Amino acid sequence: MGGRQEKDEFSDARQRMLKHDLQGRDITDPRVLKVMAQIPREEFVPKEYRWQAYSDGPLPIGMGQTISQPYIVALMTQELRVDRNCKVLEVGTGSGYQAAVLSNLANVVYTIEKFKELSESAQAALRKLGISNIEFCIGDGSCGWPKEQLPEKGYFDRIILTAAVPIIPEPLIEQLADGGLIVAPVGCAGVQELIVAKKRVGKLIERHVCGCRFVRLIGKYGFDQ
């Protein structure tokens, strides 16, 4: 009985999230709304925060990292314009929630995480949900995906950063296909600007979406420790 009540409670909370935090703002892509309704966010947060799984705010997941608020996940996904032909690189696996959302829209998701503990936790959550079109790597995401393991043609159609960078790392620009999109929080360690950039003949054409606040991406082409 308790499990059934918990399930119903999450269902109601998920619907409130969709109606008020997503549709009530500027999330209009029906595919994004559908997948956000399907993915159980509670499976990606620590047990002590499960009751807050559908509140529109970030939650701690350990190692000084957070799971982004539902609205930001939906907004970044919508701006990325993923379809079933896309190979997507995610920099910053974190909880695995963003990867789960993308996996329902893309061909394959490649996700890289600095912290082994977080990557393993995310992999366990994704396995539990039967999601199998995700490739994992532990390493410095600011350097991109390991060159010897790049997908066919050596490029990604879409790249998403779930941690802030001072500028978009050059290795990621190199791994983005011409005509591809990259979505990233860019700026100082405190407040950043969410940027969508399209690659044209080796250069990025940027569009600013909104202000945002993310944890820093620590790495060779990110922030120092």
Image (tube, rainbow, N blue to C red):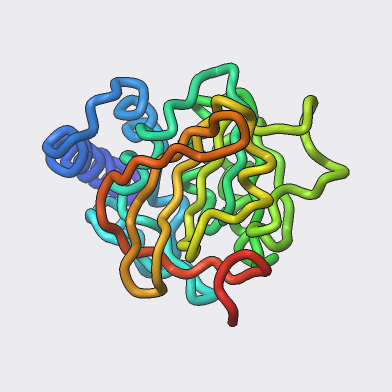
Numbered disc total:
0
Who's the residue at 54% across and 29% down the image?
200
The one of 129 and 95 positioned closer to us in this rendering = 95
On the question of residue 1 being in view, the answer is no
> Can you say which quadrant of the picture contains the C terminus?
bottom right
**Quick one: which residue is furthest to the bottom in this view?**
225
Query: Where's residue 30, x and y in %?
Result: 29, 21
- Residue 143 falls in which quadrant of the image? bottom right
The one of 40 and 143 positioned closer to us in this rendering = 143
The one of 176 and 45 positioned closer to us in this rendering = 176
Describe residue 73's horizontal placement relative to residue 150 as left or right.
Answer: left
Query: Where's residue 35, x and y in %?
Result: 39, 29
Describe residue 24's horizontal placement relative to residue 1 as left or right.
Answer: left
Query: Where's residue 111, x and y in %?
Result: 63, 46
Query: Where's residue 198, x and y in %?
Result: 48, 33
Who's the residue at 40% across and 41% down the image?
206
Compared to 83, does 155 lie above or below?
below
Who's the residue at 77% across and 32% down the image?
154
Who's the residue at 35% across and 32% down the image?
78
**Quick one: which residue is furthest to the right in this view?**
148
Compared to 39, does 63 lie above or below?
below
Compared to 128, does 138 lie above or below?
below
On the question of residue 53 being in view, the answer is yes
